[in-house]
Amino acid sequence: MSDNRYINLVKTSLEVIKSSHVPLRSSKFSKKTYSQHQLFTLIILKEEIRMDYRDFSELLPNLITIIDILQLKQIPHFTTLQKFLSRIPALTFRIILKIVIRRLHQKGEKIKITSIDSTGFTSSYASHYYSKRINKTRKSFIKASIAVDSDNLIILGWKFSKIPIHDSQHAKTLINQVVRITKSDCFTMDKGYDSENIHKYIREIIKADSVIPFRKWNGNIYSGEYRMEMIENFNQEIYGQRNMVETVFSVIKRRYGENVRSRKYFNQLKEIKIRMVLYNMTL
C-alpha cells in the first residue's frame, strides 16, 4: 500500500465516522486528550496494516502526515486503543457499514442478485504456558455470514455466532439487513440454506426471487411448493453468481488474515467488522 493510500484511507475513515454521528467525546468528563474520531480512525488504520496494538503505537510517531491529519497532540498508548475498541457500541459498526454502502450504492438503486454464504474466523490466542503444556495451539471459532451484491462485490450485511450453527439460522437476519438498505431482485445461496421457509420468506414477504439448490435427507426430497420449483426450473446461470461471495471472503482473508487478535469475543467480532468495512471502503 502506498503512502497516499494510507492518507486517503484516514481521510475517508474520518468522513465516515463523522457521518455516523459518533460523539466527539465519550463523556463530558473525559480527559479530552483524544477524540473518539481520532481513536476510531487509528483502529481502522491499525487493522489495514495488520499490526497488533503495541507495534502500531510504536510505528505511529513515524507517520507524520497522518498525525497532522488527525491533529494528534500526543501518541496514544496501545492500551488506550484496546480499551476504546471495547467501548464502541455494536450498533455503531452497523451504521458505519450502511454509510459506506451509501457511498458505493445510490439510494433506490436495485441490486440484481444478492448472494449469501458463511465462513469461519479463528482466534489462536492462548497463554504460552498453556499451549506448551498441551503441546498444541488452542483456537476458537467464529462463524461469519455475509450478504454480497454479486455485481459490485459490496458487503451489504453480516451476522456472527460464537459456535457453529446451521447456515439457515443466519439467512433471515441477512435478508432483512439488505432490504433495509435497498431492494434486491433475487437472493441466491448454496444448498446449506435449502428450506421451504426461506424460499417462502423471500418470495412472499420480500417479493424477490430465490435460487437455492435442493438437497436430500436420507436419500429423499421432502417437497414444498418453491422447493419443487427449484427441482424443475433451477437457474444455473443465476446460481453461478453465488461464487462472488466466496470471492469476497477470499479477498478479506488474503488481505487481513483469518485469525483475530483480540481475546474477548465481542472485540473479536469488532475486528472482523472493521475488516469488512475496510474491504468496502477500499473497493
Image (spheres, rainbow, N blue to C red):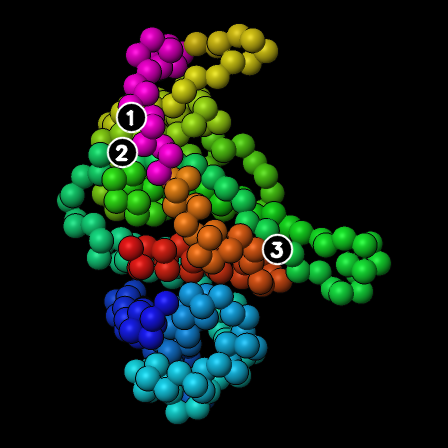
Label disc, if present, on residue 238 of the rendered structure:
1
Q: Residue at x 48, y 17 (%)?
A: 215
The label number, if any, that marks residue 113 in the structure image: 2
What segment is highlighted magenta in the picture? 224-244
Q: Are marks 2 and 1 in contact (CB under 8 Å)?
A: yes
SS type, badge 3? strand
Where does residue 16 sit, x and y in percent of width and height?
Answer: 28, 66
For label 3, count other residues whose C-alpha is less than 10 Å away and answer few (under 14), some (14-19) or many (20+). Answer: many
The answer to if 11 sits in the magenta stretch is no
* Residue at 49% across, 45% down: 144
Query: Which residue, given by chain and number where applicable, does mark 3 sit on?
Result: 123
Q: Position of residue 228 (x, y in %)?
A: 37, 10
Q: Amino acid at mark 1?
A: Ile
Q: Residue furthest right?
A: 133
Q: Residues within 10 Å of mark 2 (few under 14, many from 20)?
A: many
Main secondary structure found in the magenta portion: helix
Quadrant that contains the C terminus: bottom left
Q: Position of residue 87 (x, y in %)?
A: 49, 69
Quadrant containing the N terminus is: bottom left
Classify residue 74 by image quadrant. bottom left
